[in-house]
Image (cartoon, grey):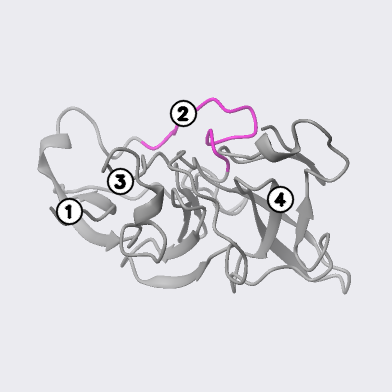
Amino acid sequence: MHVRTTLALCCALVACARSATPSPSAPRGAGTDWRSYGHDPGGMRFSPLAEIDRSNVTRLVRAWTYHTGEVEQRGAAAALAGGRPPSFQTTPLMIDGVLYLSTPTQRVVALDAETGRERWTFDPYVGRERQRTAAPHRGVAYWEGPAAAGAAEARILFGTMDGRLVALDARTGRPIPSFGDAGAVDLRRGMTDVAGAYGMTSPPTIYRDLVIAGA
């Protein structure tokens, strides 16, 4: 059987439905975005959107489908456990009309939320040995702040199963040259007996300008 991991986004076709529009004084994306793994920095996993409810949920239809291509990726077949594809457990971030998600092989994808069009993809194992694992990868983190020149800068941060913390430009998907070693920090550096067992399957937590990573 040919198996492909799929991400589908559904939308409601409801008569007289209204989009949740924040007030002019509200922060950008307030009420409509999902900017953290648990929706907000406190991880409450609650959305205030009320357009979809029990009266219209049965009228949801598929808006678009995106195939991640995990099984087709070179080396992905070796990561299968017992012939099954790796578990797909990511929670996408929704920020300013863009979905950011990760795959079981720790690739990161940016999609246009309206159309499902792929904006960019990033594979952290290009040019290096891919980690042979079927462990799930649950998502990425988002940071926004002023750049060195004073302009706004947005980054996607995530961990890999070989113990790296990677920072990408949210607009282009390219590594941030000034972050760590060409865009990545080796979290195993300085470890001794557990160095080979350290990896990240969940997104880090962002507090102001601090990245808090687990394992």
Determine the main secondary structure of the stretch shown in magenta. loop
Quarter assignment of residue 206 = top right
Q: Quadrant of the C terminus?
A: top right
Mark 4 or mark 2, whichever is nearer to me:
4
Q: CA distance from mark 3 to mark 1?
A: 23 Å
Please identify, in this view, whether the residue under mark 3 or under mark 1 is nearer the observer: 3
* Dot 4 or dot 2, earlier in sequence: 2
Three-letter code for the amino acid on which mark 4 is drawn:
Leu
Give the label on residue 47, or none. Answer: none
Q: Residue at x 36, y 39 (%)?
A: 87
Q: Amino acid at mark 3?
A: Pro
In front of the other: 23 or 70: 70
Q: Nearer the viewer, residue 39 or 92?
A: 92
| Secondary element at tag 3 | loop
Crowdedness of circle 3 by 10 Å Cα count: few (<14), some, many (20+)? some
- Which label's residue is closer to the chain start, 2 or 1? 2
The three-letter code of the residue at mark 1 reads Arg
In whole angstroms, how far apart are the C-alphas of marks 2 and 1?
22 Å
Q: Which stretch appears magenta?
A: 36-49
Question: Relative to 149, does residue 35 appear above or below in the rendering?
Answer: above
Which residue does the numbered mark 4 point to in the structure image?
165
Q: Which residue is mark 2?
A: 46
Residue 21 visible in rendering: yes
Q: Position of residue 113 (x, y in %)?
A: 38, 61
Inter-mark Cα distance, 4 to 1: 34 Å
Residue carrying label 1:
62
State the residue at coordinates (26%, 52%). 8
**Horizontal placement of 174 versus 58: left or right?**
right
